[in-house]
């Protein structure tokens, strides 16, 4: 859907960059920051906020739940016409 994204992020304990163990919040913050900076640069617009400050997270605990979440994400764009923000 154009007004939000879904992602499955796997934190496996490997080190990455300057932070030895980035948290989910670190990852989301970096993604939002880099994406906002690039979008603003491409549109020649500075200081525009494109993401809300919070995010929703859910820990997937088993394979069945993973499959259910994956199916939800896969089918989600087809529901855009029913979204309250659909124009």
Image (cartoon, rainbow, N blue to C red):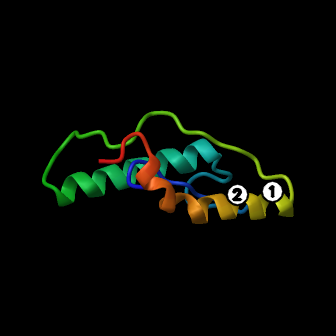
Q: Residue at x 66, y 53 (%)?
A: 20
Q: Is residue 13 visible from the viewing direction of this image?
A: no
Determine the image quadrant of residue 34. Answer: bottom left
Q: Distance between the residues labelled 1 and 2?
A: 6 Å
Q: Among all residues in the image, which is located at the extreme top?
A: 53
- Residue that numbered label 1 is attached to: 65
Q: Left or right? Give the position of 36 relative to 53.
A: left
**Secondary structure at numbered mark 2:** helix
Q: Left or right? Give the position of 47 relative to 52.
A: left
Crowd around label 2: few <14 · some 14–19 · many ≥20 (10 Å): some
Taking depth in this image into account, of 65 and 79 the one nearest to the observer is 79
Image coordinates of residue 45 in percent, x first then y, are 15, 48
Taking depth in this image into account, of 28 and 83 the one nearest to the observer is 83
Are the two marked residues, 1 and 2, in contact with CB atoms closer than 8 angstroms?
A: yes
Could you say which disc has been placed on residue 69 in the image?
Answer: 2
Q: Left or right? Give the position of 61 relative to 79.
A: right
Image coordinates of residue 78 in percent, x first then y, are 49, 62
Q: Among all residues in the image, which is located at the extreme left?
A: 44
Q: Among all residues in the image, which is located at the extreme front?
A: 82
Image coordinates of residue 77 in percent, x first then y, are 49, 61
**Number of numbered callouts drawn:** 2
Crowd around label 1: few <14 · some 14–19 · many ≥20 (10 Å): few
Q: Quadrant of the N terminus?
A: bottom left
Q: Residue at x 42, y 36 (%)?
A: 52
Image coordinates of residue 49 in percent, x first then y, are 30, 39
Taking depth in this image into account, of 17 and 78 the one nearest to the observer is 78
Could you say which disc has been placed on residue 50 in the image?
Answer: none
Q: Residue at x 22, y 39 (%)?
A: 47
Q: Which residue is drawn at 59% across and 66% down?
A: 74
**Secondary structure at numbered mark 1:** helix
């Amino acid at each position: 859907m154009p007004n939000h994204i879904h992602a499955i992020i796997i934190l496996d304990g490997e080190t990455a960059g300057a932070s030895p163990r980035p948290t989910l919040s670190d990852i989301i913050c970096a993604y939002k920051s880099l994406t906002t900076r690039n979008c603003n640069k491409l549109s020649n617009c500075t200081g525009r906020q494109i993401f809300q400050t919070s995010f929703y997270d859910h820990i997937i605990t088993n394979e069945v739940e993973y499959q259910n979440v994956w199916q939800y994400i896969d089918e989600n764009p087809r529901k855009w016409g029913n979204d309250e923000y659909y124009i």
